[in-house]
Image (tube, helix red, strand yellow):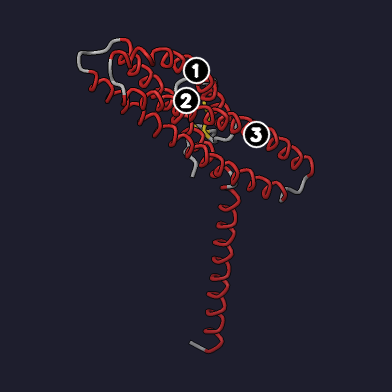
């Protein structure tokens, strides 16, 4: 093949290489833009779901601990030690549950902070002012709702620990005086713990609904109204793309 022909062939191949590279670059650029911020939004939403589950678990542990204390104080067996050990173990599980709820709150805060910061960055890249203003307004609404729920979460957790401390004091008192008279002496304390705990549980139940509502504001997964109002946890429906899973 003549040198001129070889040059033409090589040139055509080089053009194809450039064209292919350009297509790949465009595809990667489009893919990057298409993913947007919804992955961070879904991560934040998932962290709220897990936080809600921890709140539910915490609420359940309060029920169990109070029931075991009530059984020990008001329905004592001939041997008080097994009932005391049951109450003590339940109280330990309650403390562990509260610790997990604290950690879940921290994770939700970090994930949501990352989501909102990225939202600001992406909004800044919007060219049309009307679109940009609408995005800013929407972000303000979602972030304000989250901040309110987050603050309520922390306030509730701040109340949980004094309740646990109070129950621990009752346990300590009984551990040194595990007798019928000892049980009689803590009866008013146990009743007081029960009344305070019910107030805490009422607040926790409301918080579960608030977390679900805030979560629905972030998720790319459509959440049924029952969950947003604090209903069943497994009521997640299809994506906004009519059943197509998000990448």
Q: How many marks?
A: 3
Q: Which mark is residue 196?
A: 1
For the question of whether residue 13 can be seen, the reply is yes
Badge 3 marks a residue whose secondary structure is helix
The percent position of residue 5, horizontal first and vertical second, equals 54, 84
Q: Nearer the viewer, mark 1 or mark 3?
A: 1
**Residue 51 vs residue 29: left or right?**
left
Disc assigned to residue 101? none
Q: CA distance from mark 2 to mark 1?
A: 8 Å
Considering every residue shown, the one lying at the far bottom of the view is: 3
**Is 148 displayed left or right of 43 in the figure?**
right
Pointer 3 or 2: first along the chain? 3
Q: Can you say whether 16 is above or below 39 in the image?
A: below
Rounded to the nearest angstrom, the CA distance separating label 1 from label 3 is: 32 Å
On screen, residue 238 versus residue 65, left or right, reads right
Q: Is residue 225 in view from this perspective?
A: no
Quote the CA–CA distance across marks 3 and 2. 32 Å
Residue carrying label 3 = 142
Secondary structure of the residue carrying tag 1 is helix
Pointer 2 with pointer 1, Cβ within 8 A:
yes
Look at 53% across and 74% down and name the residue there.
13
Circle 1 residues within 10 Å: few <14, some 14–19, many ≥20:
few
Q: Mark 2 = which residue?
A: 163
Write the residue at 55% across / 35% down.
Answer: 219
Give the class, few, some or many, for how many residues have Cα within 10 Å of label 2's Cα (few <14, many ≥20). some
């Amino acid at each position: 093949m003549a040198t001129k022909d070889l040059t033409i062939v090589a040139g055509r191949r080089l053009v194809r290489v450039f064209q292919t590279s350009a297509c790949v670059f465009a595809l990667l650029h489009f893919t990057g833009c298409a993913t947007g911020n919804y992955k961070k939004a879904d991560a934040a939403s998932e962290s709220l779901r897990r936080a809600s589950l921890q709140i539910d678990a915490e609420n359940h542990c309060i029920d169990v601990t109070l029931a075991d204390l009530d059984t020990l104080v008001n329905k004592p067996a001939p041997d008080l030690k097994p009932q005391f050990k049951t109450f003590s173990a339940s109280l330990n599980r309650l403390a562990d549950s509260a610790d997990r709820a604290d950690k879940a709150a921290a994770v939700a805060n970090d994930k949501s902070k990352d989501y909102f910061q990225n939202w600001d960055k992406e909004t800044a890249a919007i060219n049309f002012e009307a679109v940009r203003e609408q995005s800013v307004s929407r972000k303000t609404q979602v972030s304000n709702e989250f901040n309110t729920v987050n603050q309520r979460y922390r306030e509730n957790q701040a109340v949980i620990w004094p309740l646990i401390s109070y129950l621990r004091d009752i346990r300590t008192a009984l551990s040194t005086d595990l007798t019928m008279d000892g049980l009689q002496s803590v009866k008013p304390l146990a009743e007081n713990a029960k009344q305070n705990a019910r107030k805490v549980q009422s607040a926790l139940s409301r918080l579960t609904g608030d977390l679900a509502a805030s979560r629905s504001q972030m998720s790319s997964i459509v959440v049924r109204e029952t969950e947003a109002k604090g209903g069943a946890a497994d009521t997640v429906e299809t994506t906004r793309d009519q059943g197509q899973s998000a990448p």
